[in-house]
Image: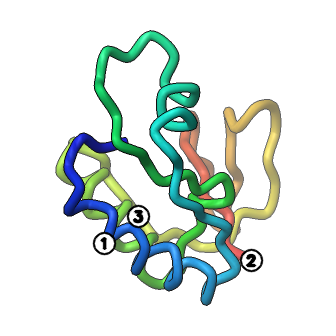
């Protein structure tokens, strides 16, 4: 949503690029922008709606997510393959050792 007319030119360009990646984006009218933001007090000139956004290129997204997680204190380890999972991600048995209480990211 925006109150700045200059934003529309950028958004028009972005929606065209989004279509190249099978994302469906469209520019919202002032009335549509207001309807999409109930309770807002902005005097919206319009907005952009991208209901299928949220996709990313894994080779770019994963390193960025890992970097952000490290900044927040997360330790990331590349471990040997998991051979079994028990419970709701409570236990992983690797080929050579056991690890308790971990978060697991599965790569296909």
Tell me what residue is drawn at x 81 percent, y 31 percent: 87
Q: Residue at x 66, y 52 (%)?
A: 51
How many other residues sit within 10 Å of disc 2, few (<14), some (14-19) or many (≥20)? few
Quarter holding residue 90: top right
Label 1: which residue?
A: 10
Q: Is residue 58 left or right of residue 84?
A: left
Q: In the image, residue 79 lies at what x, y percent? A: 52, 69
Please identify the quadrant where the N terminus is shown.
top left
User: In the orientation shown, which residue stands out farthest toward the top?
Assistant: 39
- Counting residues from the start of the chain, the first of labels 1 and 2 encountered is 1
The residue positioned 26% from the left and 63% from the top of the image is 67
- The residue lying toward the viewer, choosing from 30 and 72, is 30
Inter-mark Cα distance, 1 to 2? 36 Å
Q: Residue 63 location in percent, x, y?
A: 36, 73
- Residue 76's quadrant in the figure? bottom left
Q: Secondary structure at mark 3?
A: loop
Between circles 2 and 3, the one closer to the viewer is 2
Residue 78 is left or right of residue 1, and the answer is: right
Where residue 82 appears, x then y in whole percent?
71, 63
Residue under the image location 26 percent in, 55 percent down: 68
In this figure, which residue is indicated by the disc labeled 2? 108
Q: Quadrant of the C terminus?
A: bottom right
Q: Nearer the viewer, residue 55 or 4?
A: 4
Indicate the secondary structure of the residue bearing disc 1.
helix
């Amino acid at each position: 949503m925006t109150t700045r007319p200059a934003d529309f030119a950028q958004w028009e360009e972005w929606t065209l690029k989004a279509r190249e990646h099978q994302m469906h984006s469209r520019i919202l009218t002032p009335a549509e922008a207001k309807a999409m933001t109930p309770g807002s007090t902005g005097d919206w000139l319009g907005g952009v709606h991208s209901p299928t956004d949220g996709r990313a290129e894994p080779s770019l997204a994963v390193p960025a997510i890992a970097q952000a997680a490290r900044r927040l204190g997360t330790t990331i380890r590349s471990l040997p393959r998991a051979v079994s999972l028990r419970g709701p991600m409570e236990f992983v048995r690797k080929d050579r050792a056991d690890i308790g209480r971990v978060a697991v990211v599965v790569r296909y």
